[in-house]
Image (cartoon, helix red, strand yellow):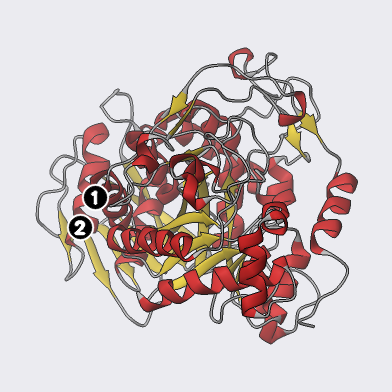
Amino acid sequence: MTPALLPRPSTVEPSSGAFRLTPATTLAAGPGLDRVAAWLRGALGPATGCFLPPGDAIRLSTDPALADGGYRLRVTAGGVELTGGGPAGVFHGVQTLLQLLPPAVYRRGAVGGADWILPAVTVHDAPRYAWRGCMLDVARHFMPKAEVLRFVDLLAMHKLNVLHLHLTDDQGWRLPVPGYPRLTEVGAWRPASMRGSRQHGILDERPHGGRYTAADLREIVAYAADRHITVVPEVDLPGHMQAAVAAYPHLGNGLAEVGVRTGWGVSPHVLNVSDAALEFCRAVIDEVCAIFPGPYVGIGGDECPKGEWRASPAAQDRMRALGLPDETALQAWFVAQVAAHVTAHGRTVYGWDEILEGGAPEGALIAAWRGPEAAVRAARAGHRVVSCPDMWTYLDYRQSDSPDEPVPVGTRLAVQDVYAFDPVPPGLTAEEAARVIGGQCNVWTEHLASARAVDYAAFPRLSAFAEVLWSGPADGFDARLAAHLDRLDALGVEYRLAAGPHPWQRRPDAPGFPKTRTQREQELRTMLGPGDAHR
């Protein structure tokens, strides 16, 4: 019988026999695999009592001939051999190894009643895409460090390898920056939050906030790295900056005195385009690069209203001095200045697809969220692309048409809709399609005020997304997911049931604003505009 593994491996060949784990079972790890071995011991030991002392019953090794991130797992009655293309591949193989055991292996203590038997099997596996990510918004609702670490573990379990951390927005600033203490003294909290969709204008009048220290963020980075997940930080600019302007009014356009935004939606209050604002952005990038060692730095670039710049004499003077035709070109110039500073740190710019307007910085990686057409435009412009079209990957969107869905916003996005996602949109040439390096799902948290709410929104849709990115859709997914839910139960994940939310997961106090796919498609066409200067 083929084990119900999720994400589905490339090939699984069951055979006769089994290997029983006991407290005497031993482990040998090849060069460079000590941390993977330590992780396996820590994951396996509490529930099973098998802490794997040194020996060779389970053998971990690497073989550079295997694909990057890929692995080969062989279980026989005599033991376990796990070989990866590198440490990441071995770690991915360890996730499969755990799934071969009863779901109770995921509990943090022994509960009894389980036989720790690994069925004899040979697995050959490798990822379909290099970028298998999830964006977590900790700006709209702050997620304490311990809950972020738990979320990292859930990503690792699903063989995802990128955590895009959305650290700043109009409603909160979570990142400490030397020389700018008011960012976290003032910008990290707001006096109230919207209850439900912004169209209803209901505020809860309850303060909300939180901030990370540099040590907290370095811990998250190190914790993720041990699980072969790269943390990609994002500081959204020049729009989505009301919290920063509230902390330092000289960064704004001087047209209104603002506090940290309490409502959802897009703030009209953006950074000015002065030398002081650019100096601020460079200081932020300096600190981001000091904390986050990964190759990518997110600078946002999305949803930047131009009204304040049109009304600002200083912005208009800057535009004339630079010989720029309009405010779209002014934004492209501003983004280019920040991008140059990112590049000077030896990093690659990661931005939302709006940065294509006016010309994206050379070499920028594009997060294409405004539908499949955005990915087409980015790829045809010669950029590498991470696909994340909202109607397939925004996990805050409602999961059914039922009025019981908590804060039902956006288009309906059921598990089956996520599973139908294809990162490569139609119409691309082979060369253009190769620029799509993967995809990510996005967990925006306007309506997700706790880890419990994030659990409900993310799972099991994230499980479906992970399989699409790892191996692609295939028959038998429903059965694999049913078995996988037992693992999520053991981990305490409060996922959405197929039948709908539990009573305590509903939010009758927080009205939503659902949309049809037709409505959303029209909105996206309007956002993108009819032309494509890069075709």
Local packing at callout 1 (Cα closer than 10 Å; few below 14, some 14-19, many 20+) is some
What residue is at 30 percent from the left and 23 percent from the top?
Answer: 111
Residue 387 placement: quadrant: bottom right
Amino acid on which the number 1 mark rests in the picture: Trp
Quadrant in which the C terminus appears = bottom right
Local packing at callout 2 (Cα closer than 10 Å; few below 14, some 14-19, many 20+) is some
* Residue indicated by mark 2: 35
What residue is at 30 percent from the left and 77 percent from the top?
Answer: 63
- Looking at this view, is 97 or 212 the one in front? 212
Residue 150, position as x, y percentages in the image: 37, 38
User: Is residue 137 positioned above or below 114 on the image?
Assistant: below
Q: Secondary structure at mark 1?
A: helix
Residue 67, position as x, y percentages in the image: 43, 76
Residue 450, position as x, y percentages in the image: 49, 27
C-alpha span from label 1 to label 2: 6 Å
Q: Secondary structure at mark 2?
A: helix
What residue is at 75 percent from the left and 84 percent from the top?
Answer: 429
Is residue 442 left or right of 81 when viewed as pictured?
right
Q: Are marks 1 and 2 in contact (CB under 8 Å)?
A: yes
Is residue 112 left or right of 350 when viewed as pictured?
left
- Looking at this view, is 96 or 462 the one in front? 462
Residue 235, position as x, y percentages in the image: 47, 55
User: Is residue 486 positioned above or below 89 on the image?
Assistant: above
User: Is residue 297 positioned above or below 224 on the image?
Assistant: below
Amino acid on which the number 2 mark rests in the picture: Arg
* Residue indicated by mark 1: 39
